[in-house]
Image (tube, grey):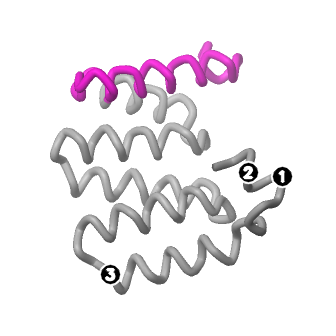
Amino acid sequence: MVLLEDPLRASAWAELGAVYTGMKRYAEAIRTLRHLGEFAPDNVQVWGLLGAALEASGDRAEAEKAFRRHVQVDPEDWKSRRTLAQFLMREGRAAEAAREFEKAAQLAPPKGSVERDREE
């Protein structure tokens, strides 16, 4: 569909989902981001945004699934691992969080590097 043909549109849908979340319109954010996830399942951005919207809405079980999918789509992305670790900490699962923080630290560019400064 259009989302697959034009990656910029996928970014627009992701932004819309983020805006809905910021406005606390969680049902609309979740619907928008799930729609995007169906058409662009390998878009790493959608899963982190969906996890955040689900967590904010109170659906912690589905939020965890989305955050784990975020890591699964790009296991080498240190930011997705950090996001999962932060979620796990909020859930009181410190041992699991520590493992994800460690993986994120191993994958992250060195502090002060241009790549890391640009990504943070």
Point out the residue furthest to the bottom here. 95
- In the image, residue 52 above or below residue 72: above
Which corner quadrant holds the N terminus?
top right
- In the image, residue 11 above or below residue 53: above
Residue sitting at x 27%, y 42%: 54
Point out the residue furthest to the front here. 112
Q: Which mark is residue 114?
A: 1
SS class of the residue under badge 1?
Answer: helix
The spot of residue 65 in percent (x, y) is: 35, 56
Nearer to me, 59 or 3? 59
- In the image, residue 17 above or below residue 53: above
Q: Residues within 10 Å of mark 2 (few under 14, many from 20)?
A: few
Q: Which mark is residue 17?
A: none
Residue sitting at x 53%, y 64%: 81
Amino acid at the residue labelled 3? Ala
Q: Is residue 59 left or right of residue 42?
A: left
The residue indicated by pointer 2 is 117
The residue indicated by pointer 3 is 94
- In the image, residue 107 above or below residue 30: below
Residue sitting at x 41%, y 25%: 17
The spot of residue 50 in percent (x, y) is: 38, 40
- Answer whether residue 99 is magenta in the image: no
The spot of residue 62 in percent (x, y) is: 26, 51
Amino acid at the residue labelled 2? Asp
Marks 2/1 in contact by CB < 8 Å: the verdict is: yes
In the rendered picture of this protein, how many numbered marks are placed on residues?
Answer: 3
Q: Which residues are magenta?
A: 1-29
Q: What kind of secondary structure does the magenta stretch mostly adopt?
A: helix
Q: CA distance from mark 2 to mark 3?
A: 27 Å
Q: Earlier in the sequence, mark 1 or mark 3?
A: 3
